[in-house]
Amino acid sequence: MAAAESSQDKHRSALRKQCLALRNQIDPALKQAYDACIITRLMQWLEGQKPEDACQALLALWWPIGSEPDWRPFAPALRKAGWRLALPCVMGPQQALRFAVYEDATELRRAAMGIHEPVRPDWIQPWVLSAPCVGFYQRYRLGYGGGYYDRSIAGLDQEARKRTVAIGYSICEVVFEPQAHDLAFAAVISERALHA
């Protein structure tokens, strides 16, 4: 059993390296075009996720690290569509993420795992939780291996899990065997397709 788990871990580690290398090689101009396509698909998907109470329209995104998909140029369009934005905050090892409101004037600091989070967090519970992918398989996200989003989704009820979306590039669509801790997202969006 341990050998099988070790083999899976090695496979995932190799997939991460492969996906990151492919992602890092995307031409910057092409990446901008991909990001625009991703945001267009995301906004179309979000139309079906709006809460009855507009005050609950809270969308958790991420501050891009390296070559992750970059939503920031499209923040005005997301806000115009009625969404307030939020960023994840790392609370500690083996803990779920918490989310804090992000406005243009929000002061950020570099924190654990290289993420940027609000200096003075205004905590919220997001209505929609989105996460960047290193890679993906069907509706399963391959992340960096810390398990933060797995724990965060595990803490959601069944209705809230229907409002989770992972974001990645089609070049990073891979095949792996989901493990017991892996939880499927409601949808995965790339520049080419919506997997739901």
Image (tube, rainbow, N blue to C red):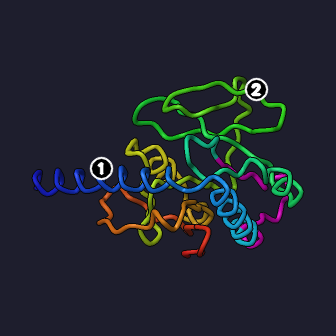
Task: Decide which of 26, 74 is in the foreground and name it.
Answer: 26
Question: In this view of the protein, can residue 49 be seen by the observer?
Answer: no
Instruction: Name the residue located 78 percent from the left edge and 63 percent from the top edge.
Output: 51
Q: Could you tell me which residue is drawn at 49 percent across and 41 percent down?
A: 96
CA separation, marks 2 and 1? 34 Å
Q: Which residues are magenta?
A: 46-61
Residue 107 marker:
2
Q: Give the mark, 2 or 1, whose residue is nearer the N terminus.
A: 1
**x then y, percent, for residue 25:** 50, 53
Q: Badge 1 is on which residue?
A: 13
Q: Is residue 22 magenta?
A: no
User: Under tag 1, what secondary structure?
Assistant: helix
Quadrant hosting residue 119: top right
Residue at 51% across / 28% down in the picture? 112
**Percent position (x, y) of residue 1?**
10, 56
Residue at 59% in and 61% down: 164
Q: Magenta includes 56?
A: yes
Q: Amino acid at mark 2?
A: Glu
* Residue 153: x %, y % from top left: 51, 53
Q: Residue 138: horizontal and vertical position, in percent?
A: 44, 72
Q: Nearer the viewer, residue 194 or 84?
A: 194
Q: Secondary structure at mark 2?
A: loop
